[in-house]
Image (cartoon, coloured by chain):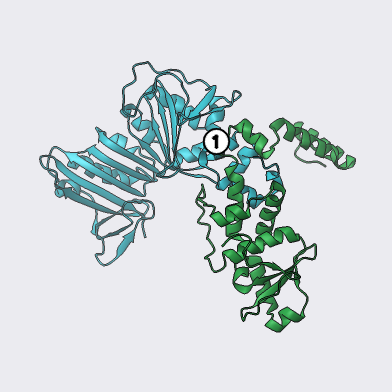
């Protein structure tokens, strides 16, 4: 069945037709021509997660919602599952002849280079990515950074980021000014690495820091380190138990009013908070800090939460 | 309720049932007249505002001329009003901005839209013009369903979409059809831009 009048419909109706398509058909529609790609861009598809995996395969996963994930395999060779160790050495990235979507449908676009594919994903189809998640080795990270780090794509990349695998790339990630950097694994992080963070929000689920290092982190922030920081949540693992005398040594602080409720507009985790300790940066900006021990058996664990310039 | 039994009647056909509910009279651009219940009209934001602004009484409806809908023909308008009568009283969906948009086509609507593409095209135009949100959703969904499982090449044929080359050729032709003097000025401007000049004068 055909409908040769699509482009003669009112603009809103054309968009409505594309919005009601199955997402896999929308992707196919976007590959017809530049005009069709622009029409798909106009409907402003929102994506929850955008995952790129580079090993012996290059796989791009785009999660539209809980139910819909598009998986694009760029290499035909070895297919590995999540967390599986590849047996083939990493390959140089090359333009794919075609993209296989969810092992189900092939989309051919011979004239597309890798840059054009990535452009197509990030500039035309999915300009609003909540989480960009790159899984790759350190050597590939440089390459992937080139692919994702140009023109408008940088805005998406800067939006949010979750990194799970290669620890060697961590400092390179931290120094960029993302909205959010979040890690989910144990990090042996030096104080210097912590202080180069340029993101607005750091969430580190396991970091090894001593009481003195926490003290130094707060002091350095007061002197101007991490200038973009709005919120940090760090679960700190330490050899020695939490000692607040050491943590607050030499830091001018004041208990925050107990009756007021603070609101953090940057983070999703703790929208409202009460109490805490206020510290002041050299330019007068106030941060409210919470340092609370966490019961964790044999380890000495505490949560460091810091809300900067909140309401 | 079947499509045939939907309570939209051409005024010159069967006798009009006498009801206390208000029925408005509308006339298509080919002079076909329809009576539509007040509740059914609420499905159309455009018509609902229009009748509210007119403030007709039951006598006005009978004595004054039917409200003319200039750019929709009788065949299309009949489908539109059948749809409105069938769905009268239903809540009008609010667009929450989610994409892809989940739309189910009910059986009645599927039967109503079992029509040729020319009429489907007119129905979408009418739904858009009259701002009938759910009718627009289901009619667009019917067109979207034609894409199911197709490759880009097949989709190009289904929707008769021009290729990039055809779009370029059409653009060139449109430029050539422009006023020759305007084109000359534009070319001169482009030339100066290439030469690095900031000002045209």
Residue that label 1 marks: B149
From the viewer's side, name the closer residue of B117 and B125.
B117
Output the chain of dot 1.
B
Task: Examine the rendering and report whether any part of residue B196 can be seen.
Answer: no
Q: Position of residue A65 (x, y in %)?
A: 43, 45
The chain letter of the cyan chain reads: A
Q: Position of residue B152 (x, y in %)?
A: 60, 32
Residue B19 occupies quadrant: bottom right
- Quarter of the image where the C terminus of chain A is located: bottom left
In this rendering, the answer to whether B87 lies above or below A300 is below
From the viewer's side, name the closer residue of A112 and B124.
B124
Q: Residue at x 22, y 44 (%)?
A: A215
Q: Residue at x 21, y 48 (%)?
A: A250
Task: Determine the secondary structure under disc 1.
Answer: loop
Q: Residue at x 80, y 41 (%)?
A: B200
Residue A260 occupies quadrant: bottom left
Task: Please give left or right for residue B7 compared with residue A248 in the image.
Answer: right
């Amino acid at each position: 069945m055909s409908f040769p009048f699509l482009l003669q419909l009112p603009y809103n109706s054309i968009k409505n037709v594309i919005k009601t398509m199955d997402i896999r058909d929308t992707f196919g529609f976007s590959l017809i021509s530049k005009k069709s790609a622009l029409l798909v861009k106009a409907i402003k598809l929102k994506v929850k997660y955008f995952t790129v995996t580079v090993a012996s395969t290059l796989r791009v996963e785009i999660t539209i919602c809980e139910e819909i994930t598009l998986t694009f395999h760029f290499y035909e060779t070895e297919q590995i599952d999540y967390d599986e160790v590849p047996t083939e050495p990493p390959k140089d990235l090359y333009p794919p002849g075609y993209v296989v979507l969810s092992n189900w449908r092939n989309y051919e676009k011979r004239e597309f280079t890798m840059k054009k594919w990535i452009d197509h994903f990030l500039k035309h189809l999915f300009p609003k990515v909540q989480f960009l998640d790159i899984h790759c080795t350190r050597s590939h990270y440089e390459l992937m950074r080139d692919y994702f780090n140009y023109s408008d794509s940088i805005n998406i990349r800067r939006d949010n980021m979750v990194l799970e695998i290669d620890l060697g790339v961590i400092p390179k990630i931290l120094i960029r000014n993302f909205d959010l950097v979040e890690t989910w694994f144990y990090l042996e992080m030096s104080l210097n690495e912590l202080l180069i963070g340029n993101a607005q929000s750091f969430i580190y689920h396991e970091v090894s820091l001593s009481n003195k290092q926490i003290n130094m982190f707060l002091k350095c922030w007061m002197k101007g380190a991490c200038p973009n920081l709005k919120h940090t949540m760090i679960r700190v693992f330490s050899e020695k138990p939490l000692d607040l005398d050491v943590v607050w040594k030499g830091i001018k602080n004041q208990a925050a009013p107990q009756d007021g409720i603070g609101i953090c507009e940057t983070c999703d985790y703790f929208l409202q908070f009460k109490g805490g300790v206020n510290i002041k940066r050299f330019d007068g900006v106030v941060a409210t800090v919470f340092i609370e021990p966490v019961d964790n058996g044999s380890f000495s664990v505490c949560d460091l939460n810091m809300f900067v310039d909140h309401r | 309720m079947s499509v045939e039994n939907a309570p939209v009647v051409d005024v010159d056909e069967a006798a009009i049932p006498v009801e206390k509910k208000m029925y408005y009279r509308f006339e298509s651009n080919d002079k076909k007249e329809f009576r539509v219940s007040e509740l059914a009209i609420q499905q159309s934001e455009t018509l609902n505002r229009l009748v509210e602004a007119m403030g007709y009484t039951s006598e006005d409806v009978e004595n004054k001329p039917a409200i003319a809908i200039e750019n929709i023909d009788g065949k299309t308008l009949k489908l539109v009003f059948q749809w409105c009568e069938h769905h009268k009283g239903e809540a009008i969906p609010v667009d929450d901005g989610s994409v892809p948009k989940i739309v189910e086509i009910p059986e009645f609507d599927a039967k109503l839209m079992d029509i040729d593409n020319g009429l489907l095209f007119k129905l979408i135009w009418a739904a858009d013009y009259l701002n009938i949100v759910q009718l627009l959703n289901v009619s667009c969904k019917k067109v979207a369903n034609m894409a199911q499982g197709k490759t880009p090449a097949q989709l190009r044929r289904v929707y008769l979409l021009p290729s990039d080359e055809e779009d370029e050729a059409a653009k060139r032709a449109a430029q050539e059809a422009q006023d020759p003097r305007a084109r000359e000025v534009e070319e001169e401007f482009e030339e100066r831009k290439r030469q690095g000049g900031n000002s045209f004068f």
